[in-house]
Each structure stands twice: as structure tokens, then as C-alpha cells.
Image (spheres, helix red, strand yellow):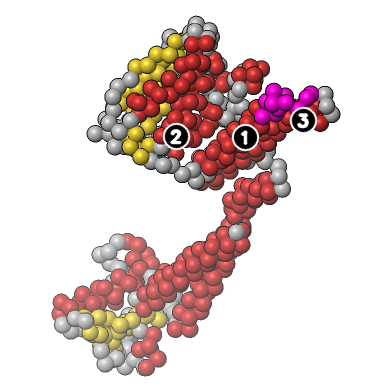
Amino acid sequence: MRLRLLLSFTLVVLVSVASVVFLTRQGAVSEVRTFMVRGGMADVANLVELLEEHYAQNGTWAGVQRLLRLPHGQGRGSQGAMMGTMMDQRLRVADSTGSVVADSATPPEFSTLTAAELEQAIPLQAGGKTAGYLLAEGGMTFSSSDEAFLIRRLNRAALIAGLVGGGLALLLSLLLAGRLLQPIRALTGLAGRMAQGDLSQRAQVQGTDELARLGRAFNEMASSLEQAQASRRAMTADIAHELRNPLSIQRAHLEALQDGIYPFTAENLEPVLQQNLLLTRLVEDLHTLALAEAGQLSLDLQPVDLTTLVQESLERFRPQADERDIRLEAELQPLPPLRVDPQRIEQILGNLLSNALRHTPDGGRVRVRLQPDSERVFVSVHDSGPGIPEEALEKIFERFYRADRARSRSQGGAGLGLSIARNLAQAHGGTLRAANHPQGGAVFTLELPAVGLE
């Protein structure tokens, strides 16, 4: 990654420097040639313009001699006159054939410019054609070799500037690449330690950029993995704890029967059978829960009269409620048939009613309410017990969780019923929520989609 970033920065730097050097060179060459071809200094350049204007106006070079006797650049500012004095040049004007028509020397010489002199002369343009030549001798004059030498110097200066700038840019790129990769290297190290089993690793996150979001996502993932590992360990311990007690009771009774302490009768076999049934129910609950959490629980969906199903569930628990003088109240409304699995819905209702009776004191009441709307159906079970502790509301549906561990096993709970009930509700496309009722007690609300409801 670091090499790729460095190569990317290097490519950007090289392209930028090469572009700057090329454009600088081309601009310098153009300016030097303009400077050389057009005379360079301001006084000669102005004189060229005067001569071209003179020929354009008159169509001939007659009278051009007087222009050479004026200070160069007269009429265009005093700077041109001063430069003309400093230059101390001899100026000759020739027509398009090279014949001299004006000469600033005293006495003037009207001859023909040689081929070498024509090469050094400045072409005078008129109407898009060369109408004559201006040859400036003495002072600051330049030849083609001077032009080539100056261009080489400029090219070398541009190349040196490009190399220095490129080197500094590459050094800066190296530093920036190291700084950018520092958080990634840190995350890589944290991920390696997590892969070795240390899930307590967390990244130091600052800012709000992409790397900061990556660090936060890493921390969330690490927290989730740590919680999952703790939950798995706790579940393993809880399963072992739940299995140990009935197995110990079975073993004790079987050993007593084997040693002749208890006579081999149906009455003495009853505790063994009860513990075996408890183990069977626990295993079945774990199997159901595993299938539901894996999304592999098969549902036998069919049209069901939910009102009748709720009423039948209440009647099954009525004897148990009557023994403790607990009133079972129902507020039900007739509904069209819903497409649900009746056995699974009955299992959910059974877990909720069993849980409500377990936490309702003698002489209390349990109220079941069935209320539909246009899209959902709500079944609530409200008990008159002490309610759910606030710290337990978020954990009440976890596997093997008990808000009151001292009472749960004596009342027949293994801490799986509510977890199974929620997963079964989710398998139907619904949900199960727990809350404390404003009038006291706990209320569990089963929410199902109104599939098939007209």
C-alpha cells in the first residue's frame, strides 16, 4: 500500500514537473526568438514599428533617412530616446532586395547587404510581406549562435529547477504517504492481534474522515465480536449448569435404585422420569432456538382464527391460575383468519402466559388483549406482578437470562422461553417487546403482520 501511494505521488509529481519544464522551455524559446528577431531592446523595437508604419503609409522607402537621425523611439516615450543613446548603434535600412536605402553612419554608405548581414537583419513587414530589412550594428547585437546559447542556458535552468522541485515533491510525498499509512498500519496490527484471540483491541480514533470512520467501524466490529464471545462462553456455562442439576438428580436416584436403597417401584422411578422430561424439553428448546436464529425454522403457515387460538391458550392455563386465585381476563376481538403457524403461535402464547403467572402474586390478575389495525395485529399480556427491573429490560430476551435467578428454576424456567418466543415472532415477520406498564406490572406485546386480514 505504501509503495502504491508513493508511486502514485511520484507519477503526479513527474507529470507536473515535466509539464512545467516543457511549457517553460517553449515559452522561453518563443520569447527569446521574439527578442532576437524583433530587436530586443525597446528603442530598436520602436524603430521597427516606425519603419513599418512609414512603408505602409508611403508604399516606398523614400524619406526613411530622417527616421534614422531621430532618437530611437521618439514619440513613444523618453525611455526609448535614452536607450538609443546608450546603445550607440549603426542602423541601416535595406529594401526587399537588400539594397541599402538609409544609413545612420556619417557619411552614409548605400550599398547592398551581404547574405550574412541579411541573416542578422530584422525583417520589416508590410501587407504580410517582407518590404525591407533593418540591420542594427554595434551596441548589443545578437547572432544565431547567441540565441542557441541563451536557449541552452534557459533549458538547463528549467531542468535544474524541475529536478529540485521534483526531489522536494518526492520527499514530501514520502512523508505524506507515511503519515497517511500510519493509521492503516495501526489497524493492521490491531487486526493481527485480534486474529490471535485478543478481542480487547481498540483503535484510537480522531477526526471525521474516511480513516476515522474505518477506525470506528473496526471498534464496533471488535465490540460485537467480544460481546459474541462473552455470550457464547456464558451460554456454554449456562447450558452446562442447566444440564448438571437434572443429570445429578437422575444419577442419584438410579444409584439408589441400583444399590437397593430405594425399592424398584414406579413411584421411585417418577423423579427420574421428570428429570428426563426436563432434559428433553431443554434440548428441544435449544434446538428450536438454534433453528430460529439460523433462519432454518420451518413454519406450517395456514389460515388460523387467532381469537380462538388465544382463547384456547387461556383455558389451558386457567386451572393453574385458579389454584393461586389469579384472574385471567381477556379483551378479544373477532378477526378474519391469519396465515400463521398455529403450533408456533401457541408456543409463544404459552411462554408469555407461563411467564406472567410465574411473576404474578396470588390473588393477582393477568389480562390478555387482542387488538388489530390495518397492517398489524397486537396481542399483549399484562400481569400484576412487580414488573421488570430497568437493567433487565434490554436483556430479558437473552438466552438463559433470569432477572431473578434464585426463583427461576424452582418455578420451572430455564431462561429460554422468552428468547424462543421472540425468535418465533420474528420468523413470522413480527416482533415481541417487553415493557413496564404505567399501572404496574410487566406487559409483553406480540406484533404480527396482518397477512390474510381483510
Residue shown at 41%/37% (left/top)? 341
382 w.r.t. 376: above or below? above
Return the residue at label 3. 254
105 w.r.t. 354: above or below? below
Residue range in magenta is: 262-273
Return the residue at label 1. 280
Position of residue 280 measured from the top left corner of the image (x, y, whole percent): 62, 35
Distance (Cα) linking label 3 and label 1? 18 Å
Q: Is residue 204 left or right of residue 322?
A: right
Position of residue 235 measured from the top left corner of the image (x, y, whole percent): 65, 34
The answer to which of marks 3 and 1 sits earlier in the sequence is 3
Label 1 element class = helix
Position of residue 12 measured from the top left corner of the image (x, y, whole percent): 50, 63
Circle 3 residues within 10 Å: few <14, some 14–19, many ≥20: some
**Magenta run includes residue 434:** no
Label 2 element class = helix
- Report if residue 88 is visible in the image: no
Position of residue 250 measured from the top left corner of the image (x, y, whole percent): 73, 30
Q: Nearer the viewer, residue 311 or 442?
A: 311
Quarter of the figure with the N terminus: bottom right
